[in-house]
Image (tube, rainbow, N blue to C red):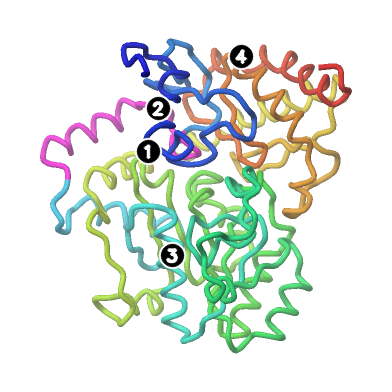
Amino acid sequence: MTDRSVTSSAALFERARAVTPGGVNSPVRAFSAVGGTPRFIRSARGAWLTDVDGNEYVDLICSWGPMLLGHAHPQVQAAIAEAVSRGTSYGTPTEPEVLLAEEIVSRTPVDKVRFVSSGTEATMSAIRLARGFTGRDLVIKFAGCYHGHVDTLLASAGSGLATLAVPGTPGVSASTAAETIVLPFNDREAVAAAFAEHGPRIACLITEATPGNMGVVPPGPGFNRFLAQTCRDHGALFISDEVMTGFRATREGGWGLDGAVEGWTPDLMTFGKVMGGGFPAAAFGGRADVMAHLAPEGPVYQAGTLSGNPIATTAGLATLRLATPEVYAALAATAETIKSAVADALTAVGVPHVVQAAGTMFSVFFRDGAVTDFAGASGQDTAAYAAFFHAMLDAGVYLPPSAFEAWFVSAAHDDRALSAILDALPGAAKAAAAIGTGTA
């Protein structure tokens, strides 16, 4: 019988596995891809995590993106505390959801937004709306892009599925899977061929604005513009999934890197992570005429008891209001310092690698040459990454426990945090090199 008086990551993981599948509530957290025991975090402040054993780590996942300002930001905490003092959920409209919607509309090309409670719910709802608006059934997605655990979109997804090498889509019916066309990312010819064959049945094409769930793989120049125009030419909707990149890659999200410059807009967009300020909150939005098909205005039904929760929308609003241009400039500088230092450390010991970025989010692939699609991402040396990960963890730096994930920084990553990262890199690079040469 487990001694419940012992509080450590190892003890908690043992207890968790007895009552939770795999001991975790989201697969990548289990450390299956890198080995070892996942750290159970007790608290976080600024750029630092503290686990139940009392160890401190510089955080380079930032709750997988949401903590743009750092953990426990005093102004965000104060806004949350004031909101909680009035109650936590009403099941009615509230002012914070209106203010947050206005903030999102002001930063992006969407006309209207609808709040939900998770990124999965946002993409699921956007797909349903696209089908209802067009009267069509087929969906196009790209291999390696992850849009949540929606049945239609789990074919050839990245992130946890890539990490765990899940074969096929168990639990998803053959008829549902048959409604999804999966294409190689950055492949214009494949897109054109799919529309030439199935155009009248295609409801929408969905893509991450910049994929981050197979590692960061930027779209080729003009690729997203090509997708938007192709959809328009065939009467399909173009859905840009910005759950990860939204308000993280730039102030305007991933759209700020290309659409805002090139002059095109998606028909629908999905948001999450940063816009919730660390709470379970997400949204989808788009053209006014498309959004008008949602109930209660239109026939496409979508609802949620906790959608637009006053605490979550307060946290998101406080975060976005504090995310000024100066904050994004600081994030970009911090990311650049880390990217350069990682590349220098790996180069010094001869470890093949490439660093790729989308605005302030980035990742490191342990392989030579640029990665342009899921096949390229899958060809990296995951064993070398695992060695690198554990060496960094032992030195007090918490990286994503998977080679197929993005790295994130926050406005709280100060000189102390950067020094800890830079000091840890040479040893971690040597650990990765030892795996590559078989001398570990």
Residue 124: mark: 3
Residue at left offset 80%, top offset 24%: 346
Would residue 69 be counted in the magenta stretch? Answer: yes
Residue 394: mark: 4
Mark 4 residue element = helix
Alpha carbon distance from label 2 to label 3 = 29 Å
Outermost residue to the bottom: 200
Alpha carbon distance from label 4 to label 2 = 21 Å
Q: Residues within 10 Å of mark 1 (few under 14, many from 20)?
A: many
Residue at left offset 52%, top offset 81%: 137
Tell me if residue 187 comes above or below residue 39 in the rendering: below
Tell me if residue 419 comes above or below residue 140 in the rendering: above
Q: Give the range drawn in magenta.
A: 63-88
Residue at left offset 42%, top offset 15%: 8
Mark 3 residue element = helix
Name which residue type carries label 1: Gly
- Tell whether 48 sits left or right of 379: left
Name the residue tied to disc 1: 278
Alpha carbon distance from label 1 to label 3 = 21 Å
- Contact flag, marks 3 and 4 (Cβ < 8 Å): no
**Of circles 2 and 3, which is in front?**
3
Closer to the camera in the image, 415 or 29: 29
Which circle's residue, 1 or 3, is located before the other in the chain?
3
- Contact flag, marks 2 and 1 (Cβ < 8 Å): yes
- Contact flag, marks 2 and 3 (Cβ < 8 Å): no
